[in-house]
Each structure stands twice: as structure tokens, then as C-alpha cells.
Image (tube, rainbow, N blue to C red):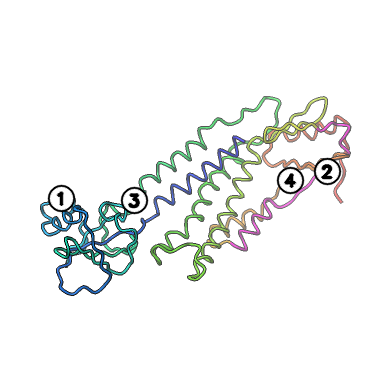
Amino acid sequence: MIEIFRRASALFLLCLGGYLMLWPGGKLLIVSPYEGTVIKGPKITVTDPDWFELAKSMTNPEDTPQLEERSYGSKHKQYIFKPDEPPFNEISHYPEQAVFVSIGNGQKWLRIYASHAGDIYSLPEQFKHPYFYHGPGLIMIGLAIYFFIPQRQYETDEIHYPRGATVIGPDIMGLILTPMFFLLPFPIVWEMDAGGSVLSISKGWIWLTGAMWLMAAIWSVLLLTALKYSDLCYRITDQGLHVIKMGKDELIKWDEIEYFRNYRTRLSGKLSSLLLIFGTTMQAVATGLMLRHQEEWGIRIHPRNGKEIKIMGNALDRFDDIVQGLKDHGVKRKNNK
């Protein structure tokens, strides 16, 4: 369970942190004083004194430094506010077309309309990517969880795979490429369609998202592979062969093994095929070709009343000890047909 938590929490925090860094922000209000005589659009009457103070400060913005920080536009003074800021939270909904707010029975008017942050050119810095600085923190926490949770320590008689090649390497690749392809649709969609959904069917974004998320799912296989070998090990005793994985110790007695045989196959054949068929980048295709031309080899153990057990010999320390242990205890090697 610790190894599952290590990868699941790290992957979740990396994706969440990246999302917060990319998110441009929700809807904002563009507010400006209106001094015209003709009102063309919806009208709203307000009575809260805060509205009057706001309209008054917009008449002389140089006296209100906080207001100057919200200024937007050059020809006409406009200001950016969030819909949940007072006094604007008094109005439940702001449409994207202009709304005219009457203050003091028409003594002053404000023109307000809502727009997505991604559609506002030269947006004041304080409103850009509002959760950007939360993202790196979450990413660092995710990496800390992965690297600082203690890993399983092996006993001297346990035969195990090296962590670098079979665990850490695939994990790092999976933790880099899975979030990258998962997050890739978001900036593309938000750049083309501010406030749009990456799952939109009517606008066709779901097809882009589906392709990218399929690639993310393919690369996540590396995390599953690393999980498999993170605590997998074998132990030879007088009773039989111990297969230890995910905290469980399974004993296969010598007299229960009918035979074993060698095997040789392409390394990660399914993964390489998926990368070659659905790969959307040259890197993915190159990785698929590389995997396709590498071989996996080892032995298959056939118990009399159980499921076949495959032991991969690639990079397994003391793999020959397992083969010798089978021979020493009278288990026959069966030739491949």
C-alpha cells in the first residue's frame, strides 16, 4: 500500500500543481464610470453606500492607489474586479454584455460587464494566473512524498531487481510524461477558447483531449511497471521458492512444481505497439521503436495445481541462483518447442 500511495499521491499532486500554474483565472468584471445620457442595456439599481464610494473614487482615481492597481485600458479608464468582491457580490449574476448600475437614483452610473481572464488583453498582473504560486508548492510536496517515503529494505537472502533501472527510471519517466500529456489540452483550449471546456463535444475539444489523455494513460503504464518491481523479490529455502510482492509472501514448494522452461520475448511489446500506433510525438514513436527491438528473457515456472509464474531475468541480481535452486531440488527443465 505504501508503494501505491507513493505513486498515486505524487502523480495527483504533480497534475494538480501543473493545473493551478496553467489556469488563467475565472470570470472577471470590467468596471468603468458611465457619464452618457442614453442607457442601452440592462439596468440595476443599488443602495449600498459602498457603491457610491466606489463610483466617487473612480472620478479621482489618483487619490486611490489601490484603484490605480486595478486600472485597465488606455482610452477610457476601466478597472478590474472579481465578482465575489464587495460590493459586486451583491449582484448574483453578471452577463457578458454590459450592465448599467444606477447609484443614488441615477446620480452616478457604472458600466459593468464580465469577461474571462484569458480574453482580457494587458490584464493587471495581480489577476493573472491567481493560483500560479500554489502550483510549485504542490509539485514539490508530490516529489517529496515520492523520494522521502522510505523504500523497502531487502534482506541478504532476497533476490531482487535493481531499483535504478526497473523502479526509479520508469517512475521518473512516468511522473514527467503522464502529467505533461494530461495537462497539455488545457492551455491549448484556454488559448483558443477562454473559459472553454476540454471535454466540449460541440466545439470538438474532446477529440484533442482524448488523444492527449490516451498518451497520458500509455505513459502511466511505466508507473504500474515500477510499482510491480518496487518490492518484488524471491527467496530460496529448503521448503521451496518464496515469491514476495506487495507485502505478501507466497511459498511454492519444490514438490509442487512440475517443471520450468526458458522464455524470450520482446520487452514491453504491448506498450511499444501502443506508442507506435497512437504516439503523437516523435519522442513517443522513438520510444516505441526502442522497446520493440529489446528482448525480455527469463523462466516460466509451472506448479502442478497453480498459476504459471514468470520470472524476468533481465537485470535480476542472482537470477542464476533461482535456476540452480530449481535444479538442485529436482525440478525438471522443459525444452521450448
Q: Secondary structure at mark 1?
A: helix
Compare marks 2 and 4 and give the one earlier in the sequence. Answer: 2
Q: Residue at x 24, y 67 (%)?
A: 100
Q: Look at label 4 and name its amino acid.
A: Trp
Tell me the residue that label 1 is attached to. 65
Say which of 170 and 227 sits in front.
227
Three-letter code, disc 3: Pro
Residue 106 vs 334, above or below: the answer is below
Q: Residue type at mark 2?
A: Arg
Q: Residues within 10 Å of mark 4 (few under 14, many from 20)?
A: some
Disc 3 target residue? 130
Q: Amino acid at mark 1?
A: Pro
What residue does disc 4 label?
297
Q: Are marks 3 and 4 in contact (CB under 8 Å)?
A: no
Q: Secondary structure at mark 2?
A: strand
Disc number lying in front (3 or 2): 3
| Quadrant in the picture for residue 301 | top right
For label 1, count other residues whose C-alpha is less than 10 Å away and answer few (under 14), some (14-19) or many (20+).
few
The residue where tag 2 is placed is 261
